[in-house]
Structures are given as structure tokens and as C-alpha cells.
Amino acid sequence: MSDFLKSLDPRINRLSIPAEFGSSFPEKDEKDQFITYEVFVQPKENKAMQHEGIVHAPTEEMAFLFAKEQFSRRGMSCVGIWVIKTTAIQVSPITENGEDIYDYINKEIMEGAEENGLSTYQVFQLAKRGKQHSLSGSVEANSFEEALWNAKNTFADDKPALNLWIVKEEDILKIEGDEFADIWNTLPDKKYRDAMDYKATEKIKKFKEEQQKA
Amino acid sequence: MYGGGQVFEPSSTNNELLKDEDPKKLAEFEARIARGEKIEPKDWMPKLYRKQLIRMIEQHAHSEIIGSLPEGTWITRAPGFKRKLALMAKVQDEVGHAQLLYGAAETLGKSREQMIEDLITGKSKYSNIFNYPTFTWADSCFISWLVDAGAIVNQLANARGSYGPYCRALDRICAEESFHLKYGHHCVIHLATGTPKQRQMMQEAVNRWWAPMMHFFGPSDKISTHTEILTKWKVKMATNDECRQQFLDMYVPKIWELGLTIPDENLKKNEETGEWEFTEPDWEEFKRVINGDGPCNKERLAVRRTAEERGAWVRRALAAKTKGDKYVAPMA
């Protein structure tokens, strides 16, 4: 055993980790970090799909599995998750001083755009710096540029949008709807993940009373 | 959870970084922060801001992932099914927090892989408190309640900072920490109000962990022009002393009400100043442990390194599916 790291942790002893190791990083032929996927979660039927963060994954199916663990393991409900490769999202500039990004989009934007045939594009808007992007809806277009123009005509309203993310429908893995409802069925059963499940006021009160008597 | 005590050393390179900045852009950047707006990844930012944030968020992420080890060791030995379930959920949360934080740091341009490499080679640090061992179940209860409580003090302060992705990660983290805190308190109450043996176990854990807990918030901050800038940029949101005082104010009475004692005879609240007084922590030990000579430094890094090495074949096998995909920094 003397050649292995000794620990108070029985699991670590079972790993048979060499007691001595160098300080250099393990050699790699090439970097092996997976790419990132952006994750969007819809917590309830009447709420918009909202950006929650990222996961690293080799495929979109695994990105979904990681996203489910990371972003829907807590809370009473979840009705859908979308995962999208970071590189598949087209991003507008972010505006200054609360200006509306739609004010900067005009018809000329479509000149010279690379047209790829008619597709559906999903549009996410940022309402305020520091908040998360949320889904406005979809538009039909022949290019990202046309999608921007159509988004202006469809979604621009009184409230300014500071930044837009646009994604082609085919680049989204959607896990939602009745077909997948079972995935989140057990969420309300996991009360042990919730602060509410650990009430102890009574116990402390009783303890204090006993201390006073003694 | 997360250890505070960020020490932002002023250095000549930092001054160099600041000297070259475009004054107009810098003024706009500072005006945005002064207005209370968040900075987002694609915004212009000073090099020093980027550098310090990466360092801070990265250390926070490492603390989460290393911090899951001393508690994780008690999952298989936690007393009863319910405690096992809860502790597993908590440890999963901690690792999840690391993932969120690595993601936030990546938006600033450092890859997760590079951060993990810097952790394993000792180039970047993590919270010092996780270099101490958990001898008994009561040690794990102390961490769940009080180390997490200290972390929440730090994290709530940082969540008011200026960098959007970090704030969003912290909001999510703080929400989950409320479960950790309640669960930890529940565990400690159970032992402290239990049999004489259970009480003794809990008291011994408090005795062991008090010094590391006082170290947790770091030494008093030296006020320099450098920390002034980081405060102005809302990178540093509270001094180490402010965090330590807040922790003492909130939790010492809760420890005392359970009939537990704290191993510092000088610990008391000065009713005139409203400040807690205590024996000055042993900062020599703090430095010694941070520099690698603590009871568990070697083990913590060895475990992380082993995970990296022994998991490499899985990543290699899966990477075959990702050929042609180019890594870019995540968006928000």
C-alpha cells in the first residue's frame, strides 16, 4: 500500500492513486474539450423559453442529457429544453443606452445575403442587460439577414430589444411536448432537494426549554 | 460553496495593463458600471478587468469542484437513506456550480480545459478550507452548514457585481445554497441536541473547523489604488473583513444557541462598535496551507488529476463524433 496515496476516504484508497506524481499536466495528443451548446429551458406552459447557460458535450443528444441534469434537476416543473450549438447562433450587436436594436435594422440589410431557401428561424431577444435572452417566436426567411428584417416586422414593439439571437430551426434539438412529458414527471417528488424539507425550529425550541429546566 | 479571501495583489504587470487602455473607452465602461448596468461578454472591457474576473471566477469554480471532495467522502457513510439522498443532491449541486462558473469564465476567453490544467498543475488556487480533512460525519455537517453559510455571504455580495454572466451564475447558485444551508443546519441540530456522544462529536468538529473558518474569508484587505479600482469596477464587492463580520454576526448566535462552544475565548461582540472581536487568526498557517503544505492539498489535486487521466479515454472515444466542430467561447 505504501506506493499508493493514503486517504481517510475509503473511495480514494480504492482508486490506487500513486503516492507521488509529477507536476506536469497529463500529455494529450490534442486538446480534448468538447464544444459548447447553449441551453434554453421552458419552466411552465405559459412562460417563454429562456436561455439558462451552457453545457460541454460531444453530441447534441449528450448536450441534452447534461442540460437536463444541470438546468432542470430542481424546481417543481419543466416542460421543455432546447439545446443549440453555440456556433449555430447568429448574434446581433448589443445596443448602447437602452436603444432598440430593431431601429438599426433596415431593408438594405438583406442586400447580398446568402440565400439558402425558405426556412424557419427562431428569434431570441434580450430585454435588459444582465437578464437572459428569451424566445420571441419564429419567422420564415431565406437567410439570416431576411430573418432579422422579418423579426423587426413581427416582434418590434414598444419595449426595446437590446440584442437578438437568431437560430435556424433545423439546428435546434427540441425536447418538449407530450411525447417527452414523462422526463420531468418525478420533479415534484424530489423534496429532499428543497430547503423547505428541512424544518427544525421546533427541535431547537424544545432543546432550549430542556436546557433551561436543567 | 465558495471560499472568499480573494487577494488581489497589485503588481507591475497589472499597472502596465491599465496604462495602455484607451481613455475614452475606459470612461464609457466606467460610466456603464456607475449607472448600474451589467457588462456582457461582447462589450469592450479593460484588460485588467478581464484578467481579474477570469482569475476570480476560475478560483470560485475550482473551489466548488474540490469542495465536493471532503463532503463526497461521507455519502456512502451518511447516517440513513434520507441523509444519503440529501448529501448526494448537495454534492451534485456543488459540481453543477463548478460547471456554471467554468461556463461564465469561458465567456471571457479562457477555455475550461485550460482552467482544469491550471488547477491540476497548481497554477491556480481554490479555497483553502478544502485542504482540511473530514474525520467524522460531524465534520461534513459543519461544512454543509457553516462553510456554505460563509460562502453565501461572499456569493450574495458578488452577485451584485458588474459582470452579467457571473451574476447570473451566482443567482442560480445562491438559490441552491439555501437548500444546503437548511440541510446543514438540520444535520448539526440533530447532533447537537442528541446523545452526549453525538454532542461531543459535533463539538469536536466545531473545534477543528473554527480556525479554517476564520481563515476562509482571507486576511484583512490592504486598501490600495488597485483594490479601489476593482471596487469601482464592481469586481470586488465587499472586503474580507466585512464578509467575516457578517458571518460572525449571523452565525455565532446560532452556534451558541445549540449549546456548542467556539474555541476562541476572545470572541465577543463589542456592543459599542457593533463589531465582533476575536483572536487574530494564524495567517502564517493560512499562507503555508495555501502554498501547498496543508493536510490534504496533495490528495485533492491527486484525485482531480486521476479523474482527468482516467477519464481521458472516454473523452477521446466521444471526441471522434465531434470532428470538424470548432470550439468557440460560449455566449452568455
Image: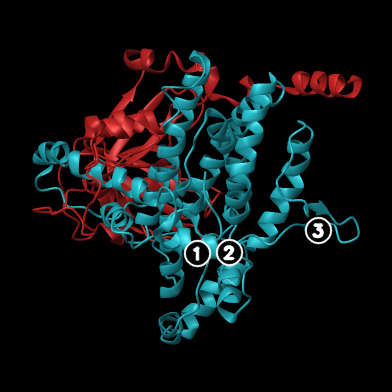
Q: B69 or B9: which is nearer to us?
A: B69
**Residue at figure coordinates x 62%, y 40% from the top left:** B146
* Callout 2 crowding tier (Cα within 10 Å): few <14, some 14–19, many ≥20: few
Whole-percent x and y of residue B198?
Answer: 64, 23
Pointer 3 or 2: first along the chain: 3
* Callout 3 crowding tier (Cα within 10 Å): few <14, some 14–19, many ≥20: some
Pointer 1 or 3: first along the chain: 3
Q: Given contact means CB atoms under 8 Å apart, are the residues at marks 2 and 1 in contact? A: yes
* Callout 1 crowding tier (Cα within 10 Å): few <14, some 14–19, many ≥20: some
| Chain of the residue where label 3 is placed in the rendered structure | B
Q: Which residue is mark 1?
A: B287
Whole-percent x and y of residue B312?
Answer: 16, 42
Q: Which residue is mark 2?
A: B283
- Give the chain ID for the red colour: A
| Chain of the residue where label 2 is placed in the rendered structure | B
**Residue at figure coordinates x 52%, y 24% from the top left:** A193
As drawn, B62 above or below B190: below
Q: Which residue is mark 3?
A: B275
Q: B287 or A184: which is nearer to us?
A: B287
Q: Which mark identifies residue B185?
A: none
Separation of marks 3 and 2 at Cα, in angstroms: 20 Å
| Chain of the residue where label 1 is placed in the rendered structure | B
